[in-house]
Amino acid sequence: MDRQAYVENIVDHFEHPRNKGRMDDADVQLGGGNPGCGDLITIYAKIGADDRVEDLSFEGAGCTISQAGGSIVTELAKGMTLDEVKDLGIPAITEEMGEEIVKSRVRCATLALGTLQAALDQFRRDRDRREAGLPPLEVKPFEV
Ligand code: FES
């Protein structure tokens, strides 16, 4: 894709977001934010017995890139295992948004992915603690 196609892809995800909305029966939810601008995103996830992401959604308010990121990342990660999501990095986002935009707006571009990965970490941590008979730890919002 050339720059124009990347921009169009981002605008399309922003204007017609996939997987946007609250999920009341999520196994985990986590808020993320960019303290530099105040933009926010919340990720909701349902995890299957085989450690696969069965469903994902997001809510948020903020710049076009960060909110398009919520749509892109939830679409990308649905059906992946927890480990596969953990391995997603900047290249996965670059494929959707283009190198130039990701480099110049890296916090915006990675807010959703970072929040998703932190949410799944929290899911695993809570599950491990539950299995060990320990109470859950305090939830910390993710920050880029
Ligand atoms: Fe705030 Fe993009 S300007 S996340």
Image: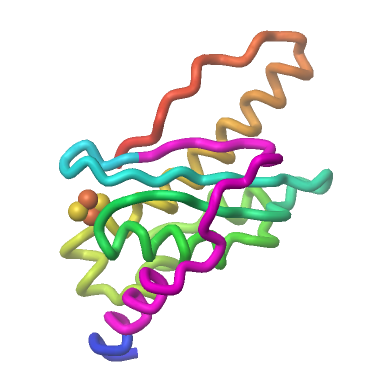
Q: Is residue 38 left or right of residue 8?
A: left
User: Residue 6 is drawn in which quadrant?
Assistant: bottom left
Quarter of the image with the N terminus in it: bottom left
- Vertical comparison of 78 with 26: above or below: below
The answer to whether residue 26 shows anywhere in this view is yes
The image position of residue 60, as x and y in percent, is 39, 49
Residue pictured at 56% horizontal, 35% vertical: 121
The image position of residue 2, as x and y in percent, is 28, 90
The image position of residue 141, as x and y in percent, is 40, 30
Residue 23 belongs to the span the image colors magenta: yes
User: Residue 16 is drawn in which quadrant?
Assistant: bottom left
Residue pictured at 26% horizontal, 42% vertical: 34
Residue 71 belongs to the span the image colors magenta: no
The answer to whether residue 107 shows anywhere in this view is no
- For the magenta stretch, what is the residue range? 6-32
User: Residue 92 is drawn in which quadrant?
Assistant: bottom left
Residue pictured at 21% horizontal, 64% vertical: 103
Residue located farthest toward the top when viewing the structure as drawn: 134
